Amino acid sequence: MNTPMTALPHPARFRRLSGPAGIGLLLALAYGLVPLVAGDYLLEAILTPFLALALAGLGLNLLVGYAGLLSLGSAAFMAVGAYAAFNLSLRVPGLPLPAAFLGGGLAAAAAGLVAGLPALRLRGFYLAVSTLAAQFFVAWALNRIGWLSNDSPSGVIGAPRLVLAGWSFEDARGRYAVSLVVVSLLTFAAWRLVRSPTGRDLVAIRDQETAARIVGVRVARTKLLAFALSSFVVGVAGVLWAFAYLRTVEPAGFNLDRSFQILFIVIIGGLGTLRGAFLGAGFIVVLPLVLSRLGAALLGDGFDSGTLEMVQRIVLGALIVAVLIREPAGLSALLDRLFTRLFDRPRRVPA
Amino acid sequence: MSPDVSFFVEVVVGGLLSGVMYALVAIGFVLIYKTSGVLNFAQGAMVLFAALTFVSLVERGLPVPAAFAATLAVMALVGLAVERAVLRPLVNQPPITLFMATLGVAYVIEGAAQLAWGTQVHALDLGIDDTPLEFGGVLVSRFDLVAAAIAGVLVAVLTLFFHTTRTGLAFRAVADDPLAALGIGLRLPRIWSAVWIASGVVALVAGLLWGARLGVQFSLSLVVLKALPVLVLGGFDSIAGAIVAGLIVGAAEKLAEVYLGPVIGGGIEGWFAYVAALALLLVRPAGLFGRRSVERA
């Protein structure tokens, strides 16, 4: 894949909204208003999974959108993060919660480093397919090696109590708060990263590997770094998924469909943009809810869950195709266009 | 032959024959990748759709030849529709976009197939008797032999088609250099349509054989996951590569299952093929039939 994956035009107007004022407003909403007004259902069943998936999308986007390396194994890194954090908090008594999160991320980064080794030889789809090795190997290992799940049948693990410095974060509001803090911190780190020299190296490799090599980018090292950094973020997202959202997870929850889901989030949201992961995750989380409500409203009782699942699959697939055809650069670019149309009306030149 | 040796030979032969089945799915990918540069993830969904349509028609009392003809027509239409509705509007988009679109298509086809025909498991009987044949103490599944023969005929037909007909020549021209092909007046859209129809037909053959083996159900669409390591090893653009890689992956997988599986805990067929393909690529970076560049791009 030598062609650049995305062109990233930023109309001036939208910048203003994703500038300090816009971000400040969003943070004020997320930290201030939402915990005040949102009910448990909204926090627990929508916002917490949204945050975890957005973080996973953010991590994958570092790899796919910025470094141009396609991975189909994100769910495996989520699983590594979740199971590593589980084992750490189980086997190290008194380990503070942030250390468990960090450990989960680091374990996932190590796994990503190993899974990224084929990137030194393979590119494009060959590389993408080789990341499936990680996907299937991790699922197998978690099922077969009893120690990893503390010998629970079929590898199911439960999250430890979310307690930090005597404060409990066990209720819906607390788990939302944990997710929000983790996601904010890592999003900030990712934002710093993509603007750092390392971030520029990633984009240089994506856009023109040979040219990047000539100007002195250490290509092999940077590719492996991209895998490690991306997997770290995805791994922490896995910890959130297991600890803050589901509370009990099994290896089957981190299957290929989950990997595709994360990839959908990135592509629908917009490759190579940080806000794309959030837009895509919002879309993926809300869509099934809208569809099931719509289905129940339209067809009433004749709409059983099996049919619903099939219809969801069809609509999701069709929407992905539609988004790609209408706007291959994703919702992020769609939003840009919308803002340009709303605010950048061509001014009339006086005659 | 001593029992150990004949058992070993049995495992290898069984592996080679199932490798042919992997190659059968892989060929559907190769046809499309060669001519339009798309890694068509929906190939597995098409395999499922074909098998499910055929079985459902037969169960509704259609005679087998009629059901086959009808399914053939449906698959040709599906291939054509995907090309027209999805790939055509995405011409000139980067490969990753096209790949994502085929993922979307896979979801649509899988959902539609099960919505139309239901989710229960169907048995598919092709009338091939599955008593093992014995060759000098080695037992070989008759079904696998017939399947391999059918795959062989399919490949022969495709090869003849590519090398003796004008359309086949046009296919190869497009695969070689789409711009030059366009420049000498080949109609690219028509060739793409033809190729998608062809891959629909390959999906039907693969679907019938795999369906008879595994039962016709959702997991049939997961045969793509068997074909992908074969493609990595053999190259996305080589039919010969797909076959040889299929044989290697099939044999290696069966051997590992029988001799390595008990040691490390069984159930390794999910990932072993991928690891084996990657290990082979480390030894032979150019792959089996890949162009002589050091890296696979």
Image (spheres, coloured by chain):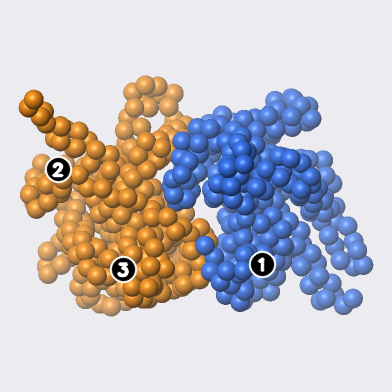
Chain colours: A orange, B blue
Identify which amino acid the numbered label 3 is placed on: Asp
Label whose residue precedes the other's in the sequence (2 or 3):
2
Q: Residue A293 carries which label?
A: none
Q: Is residue A235 visible?
A: no
Q: Which mark is residue A201?
A: 3
**How many numbered marks have been drawn onto this rendered protein structure?**
3
Q: Position of residue B39 (x, y in %)?
A: 54, 50
Q: Mark 3 lies on which chain?
A: A
As drawn, A166 above or below B126: below
Look at 64% across and 62% down and name the residue there: B234
Identify which amino acid the numbered label 1 is placed on: Leu
Q: Could you give the CA–CA distance between mark 2 and mark 3, rounded to whole angstroms?
A: 28 Å
Horizontal relation, residue A138 to residue A278: left or right: right
Q: Name the residue under label 2.
A: A13
Q: Which chain carries label 2?
A: A
Q: Residue furthest front?
A: A351
Identify which amino acid the numbered label 2 is placed on: Arg
Residues packed near mark 1 inside 10 Å, few (<14), some (14 to 19) or many (20 plus)? many
Q: Which chain carries label 1?
A: B
Look at 18% across and 58% down and name the residue there: A184
Element on which disc 3 rests: helix
Q: Could you give the CA–CA distance between mark 3 and mark 1, rounded to whole angstroms?
A: 33 Å
Element on which disc 2 rests: helix
Say which of B158 and A25 sits in front. Answer: B158
Say which of B76 and A135 sits in front. Answer: B76
As drawn, B88 above or below A350: below
Whether callout 1 and callout 2 share a subunit is answered: no
Q: In what quadrant of the picture does the N terminus of chain B appear?
A: bottom right
Whether callout 3 and callout 1 share a subunit is answered: no
Q: Name the residue under label 1.
A: B288
